[in-house]
Image (cartoon, coloured by chain):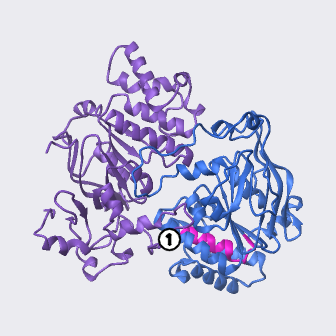
Amino acid sequence: MSTPLLKVVDLKKHFPVRGGLFRRVQAWVRAVDGVNFELERERTLGLVGESGCGKSTLGRTVLRLTEPTGGDIRLNGESIRGLSIQQMKAKRREMQIIYQDPYASLSPRRLIGQTIQEPLDVHGIGTPAERRRRVEELLDIVGLRKQVLSRYPHEFSGGQRQRIGIARALALNPSFIVADEPVSALDVSVQSQVLNVIARLQREHGVSFLFISHDLAVIQHVSDDVGVMYLGKLVEFAASEDLYRDPKHPYTRALMSAIPVPDVKRKSRRIVLGGDVPSPMHPPAGCPFHPRCPEAMPQCREVVPPRVNAGSAARPHYVRCHLYTDVAAAGAGNGTEA
Amino acid sequence: MSRGEPVLSVRNLVVEFATRYGPVRAVDDVSFDVYPNETLGIVGESGCGKTVTGLSILGLIPSPPGRIVSGDILLGGRNLTELPEEQLRDLRGHEISMIFQEPMTALNPVLTIGSQMVDVLRRHKQYTRRQARSVAVEMLSRVGLPAPGKRIDEYPHQMSGGMRQRAMIAMALSCDPKVLIADEPTTALDVTTQAQVLEQIVELQAEFHMAVVLITHDLGVVAETCHRALVMYCGEVIERAEIESLFEAPRHPYSRGLLDSIPRLREDELEELPVIPGMVPDLLHLPPGCRFADRCSRVTDGCRSARPRLDGGPGSASAVACFHPLS
């Protein structure tokens, strides 16, 4: 098999919590705690989880917008962890990010044209005329008219600003974009428009996405593979089709059943979880999900479940749950993590 | 369909806000009834006037710049738009309560949950401090707050978002209101917490026999909790229907479009999501005809010159404001 576009190995990001008289480190928040995944070219990996699960931190850490605490990030087989700031700058042409809040991520004093052209200027790409042409091309891709170039962000609606953000992220022709909740701030009718723009980028421009969202339905719509995060760990990871057809982890199942469905016929057989997500500063021992898990067993309180492959070698379906630990071990350790 | 007398009636409500560019009509001729024992959804996208409608009912429109231009809000034989602030205050939290999207903005951060609840109870009911406290603990346990006897002495910041929302619901229901207005009560919560809180609201609604007006942008929430719903667009109610017919056979093209454009869990792959083209018109420059005309697939010349009105009064089972409704 060819090298994946992006390979994340045992990635960790721990934030210190300081306090007391001397601002000493009193605890660590394990925002990202040993995450592994691969992203193939021209595919989209959806990352889903609730607030505080570490999904945004993971997105930022993958781009080294925050420095990882441990583990490795390989882009096209090459580790980017040890790269200098200069070397990183060159790599950033390949990897871009779109943020949730289209109101906060555009400079209010810059014309839209300047904003979109900025990455081209920074990286010194093309002649001024070529840059202008590229900007117009980008507008076309995201479905905006040329007239917007000489206007300011406040003149636009949320959906249009998000398109502008996408156009800017696309300027350098990246092979990989982290999209952090790109449609969460938008109204439904506009949300679907922006999702379609993203889907088109995947199909027609071969861009890979790490698509972060709390919304399982949105994730399903855009993703080829899906990872479910809970307290800094990927608790389930599989091809989108497999994960939605046959969710393995009790958390994934609860998450799916909790979505309010705009359908009056489907009276829900809902799994309502008790309690809240625990503080990532004091995660529970054993499986972090056990205090809320409807299927918790004695060992879940003590032993951290390893990542096992509950699918087949050809179609891996990774899950961190003791319900599957024994099954996979019996299957001659097909893919158990070291 | 007979549901008895409405507990709350809104008639021809018009609310305007003064802006630098002239008055903006956020709510334009809205009428509806709310019956006891029912949950009425008000659904629409940002800026459609759903929140302003809810705030007007309690007389909470910030004024200036806002102002109820005309219309009546009738609750138990009184017209709330004509009541002096003093009397409105006696009603709020007592006969009619409201819960908000972000409980942190509605709760006082420097007072414990208990002292806030005791204040409300003592103001509206003639309770002693001790009685009020025991009612407060009882309410907190009814909304499913764990360890209510202990939680009552906590400050809002010591609680999680879901717990704060429960505390706010407990406070809103403590005086046994006839009507609860819930403005995006679960929007700030995670899905698993949202499921808990929605379930709680549905249970409490039945238990307290109150009417709930649930304001939300989420059609999924409406489908799972409401009996009837109003769909709003640009300050107007464009469709009113029983929940089954709204979701099974929406009649306004906008309602249909909204339902279609929601990404939902599905078995089959879908290349493109259906979209409603264009965007909501600027409330300062509304077209003379139908406000949805520019985005509508069924538009005709007539739609652009005349404005469609709801084809049934507030007492009718359903109504739609469209010249070419879907059948």
Disc 1 is placed on an element classified as loop
What secondary structure predominates along the stretch shown in magenta? helix
The blue chain is: B
Residue at 52 percent across and 52 percent down: it is B262
Q: Nearer the viewer, residue A329 or B196?
A: A329
Residue at 82 percent across and 53 percent down: it is B13
Q: What is the x, y in percent for residue B21? A: 75, 33
User: Which quarter of the image is occupied by the N terminus of chain A?
Assistant: top left
User: Which quarter of the image is occupied by the C terminus of chain A?
Assistant: bottom left
Q: Which residue is mark 1?
A: A268
Residue at 20 percent across and 72 percent down: it is A325
Q: Nearer the viewer, residue A52 or B238?
A: B238
From which residue to which does the magenta span run? B163-179
The image shows residue B264, relative to residue A151, as above or below, that is below
- Colour that chain A carries in the picture: purple
Figure disc tally: 1
Callout 1: few (<14), some (14-19), or many (20+) C-alpha neighbours within 10 Å?
A: some
